[in-house]
Image (cartoon, helix red, strand yellow):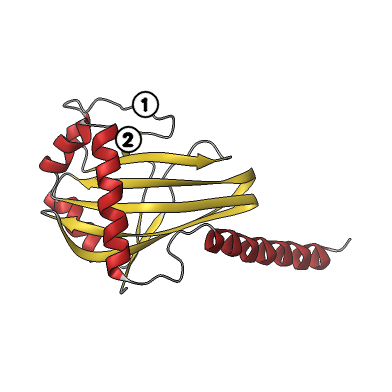
């Protein structure tokens, strides 16, 4: 098989995988097609209530944060190539100031689908300002997790609280294990 044929097949496979992933995420009720801000706000409120009830230590983090990005439902699916999509809101002092979408793409050995919620706690004004100024903020490997995919609540100690951005990932349902936010991109949207 020639190199050109292989490249063409690889691109075709990648494109088909992306289209299949888009169909799966649309079918999973993650907010695709529902641009209504009131719907997103209702999901955000429900997600925060669930998080506070299940992980009470997150109430202290919320009180100390300068802002929180709440993504009520992110659907992630993959078969060799994968992706994730969801919508949520940025809250400052408990009020919605902006709406955001989250997108993640990856490649590698993977199969399955899962849904989860996550909240980013911006612990410094600089971290919040940097997030709001960016045209597309990407989560890095340096995020500190206070709640992670195995459902364990990690105590927020003095080392954790010095991190500019903390993450809580919870409510997983599905067949994929290991929800992380590394490589996730957040972009402001108008609902």
Residue 56 percent across, percent down from the top left: 21, 31
**Closer-to-camera residue (99/142):** 99
In this rendering, does residue 117 appear at all? yes
Alpha carbons under labels 1 and 2: distance apart: 10 Å
Who is closer to the viewer here, 171 or 86? Answer: 171
| The quadrant where residue 15 appears | bottom right
* Image-based side of 35 in relation to 178, left or right: left
Name the element at disc 1. Answer: loop
Residue at the image position 86 percent from the left and 63 percent from the top? 2
As drawn, the label of residue 19 is none
According to the picture, the residue beneath numbered tag 1 turns out to be 152
Q: Is residue 175 left or right of residue 117?
A: right
Residue drawn at x 42%, y 63% is 31
Quadrant, the N terminus: bottom right
Residue under pointer 2: 145
Q: Residue furthest right?
A: 1
Relative to 16, 181 lies left or right: left
Q: Quadrant of the C terminus?
A: bottom left
**At numbered mark 2, what does the secondary structure look like: helix, strand or loop?**
strand
Mark 2 neighbour class, 10 Å CA radius: few under 14, some 14 to 19, many 20 or more: many
Q: Is residue 134 in view?
A: no
Image point (49%, 53%), residue name: 75
Residue 96 location, x and y as percent?
Answer: 19, 62
Residue 64: % across, % down: 11, 41
């Amino acid at each position: 098989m020639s190199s050109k044929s292989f490249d063409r097949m690889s691109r075709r496979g990648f494109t088909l995988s992306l289209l299949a992933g888009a169909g799966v995420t649309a079918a999973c009720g993650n907010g695709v097609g529902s641009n209504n801000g009131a719907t997103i706000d209702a999901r955000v409120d429900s997600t925060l209530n669930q998080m506070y009830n299940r992980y009470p230590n997150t109430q202290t983090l919320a009180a100390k944060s300068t802002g929180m990005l709440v993504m009520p439902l992110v659907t992630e699916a993959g078969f060799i190539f994968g992706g994730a999509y969801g919508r949520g809101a940025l809250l400052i002092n408990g009020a919605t100031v902006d709406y955001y979408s989250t997108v993640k793409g990856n490649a590698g050995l993977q199969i399955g689908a899962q849904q989860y919620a996550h909240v980013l706690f911006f612990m410094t004004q600089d971290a919040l300002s940097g997030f709001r100024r960016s045209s597309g903020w990407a989560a890095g490997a340096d995020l500190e997790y206070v709640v992670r995919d195995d459902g364990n609540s990690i105590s927020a100690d003095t080392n954790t609280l010095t991190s500019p951005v903390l993450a809580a990932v919870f409510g997983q349902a599905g067949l994929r294990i290991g929800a992380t936010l590394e490589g996730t991109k957040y972009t402001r949207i108008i609902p």
